[in-house]
């Protein structure tokens, strides 16, 4: 169902979008999008299993090992205020 210029202007107002002077171009673009959606809805997908990705991809997993060394003492020394292994920050919510 093609849109009218008034409908396009109303949609733009509801979405708080500024509209170019020529509404016809926007209307034609929206109509082509709606035509594509209509065309896609016609396709019979009853026997097609949903997929999480359009391609059959296998996730390459690596071994879960620790690669970083603890640097807490170094980071705490750089902090403006730290006490008992915690960073002290100013209170921002009362």
Image (cartoon, rainbow, N blue to C red):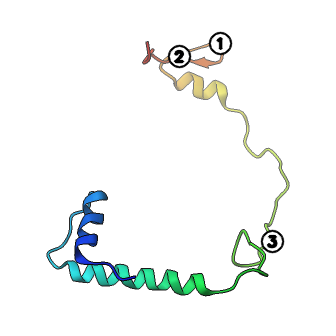
Task: Tell me: 12 left or right of 94.
Answer: left
SS for dot 3:
loop
The total number of labels drawn is 3
| Residue position marked by numbered label 3 in the rendering | 58
Front residue of 75/4: it is: 4
**Residue 88 numbered mark, or none:** 2
| Disc 2 to disc 3, C-alpha distance | 44 Å
| Disc 1 to disc 2, C-alpha distance | 10 Å
SS for dot 2:
loop
At 59% across and 23% down in the image, what residue appears?
Answer: 76
Residue 6, picture quadrant: bottom left
**Residue 82, percent across and down?**
56, 16
Give the position of the N terminus as an image quadrant: bottom left
- Mark whose residue sits in front, 2 or 3: 3
**Residue 11 numbered mark, or none:** none
Give the position of the C terminus as an image quadrant: top left
| Residue position marked by numbered label 1 in the rendering | 84
Residue 34, picture quadrant: bottom left
| Disc 1 to disc 3, C-alpha distance | 45 Å
Front residue of 21/42: it is: 42
């Amino acid at each position: 169902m093609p849109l009218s210029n008034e409908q396009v202007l109303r949609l733009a107002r509801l979405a708080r979008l500024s509209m170019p002077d020529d509404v016809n171009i926007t209307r034609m673009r929206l109509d082509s999008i709606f035509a594509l959606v209509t065309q896609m809805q016609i396709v019979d997908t009853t026997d097609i299993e949903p997929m999480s990705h359009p391609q059959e991809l296998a996730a390459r997993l690596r071994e879960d090992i620790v690669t970083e060394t603890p640097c807490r003492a170094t980071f705490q020394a750089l902090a403006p205020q730290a006490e008992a292994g915690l960073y002290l920050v100013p209170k921002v919510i009362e």
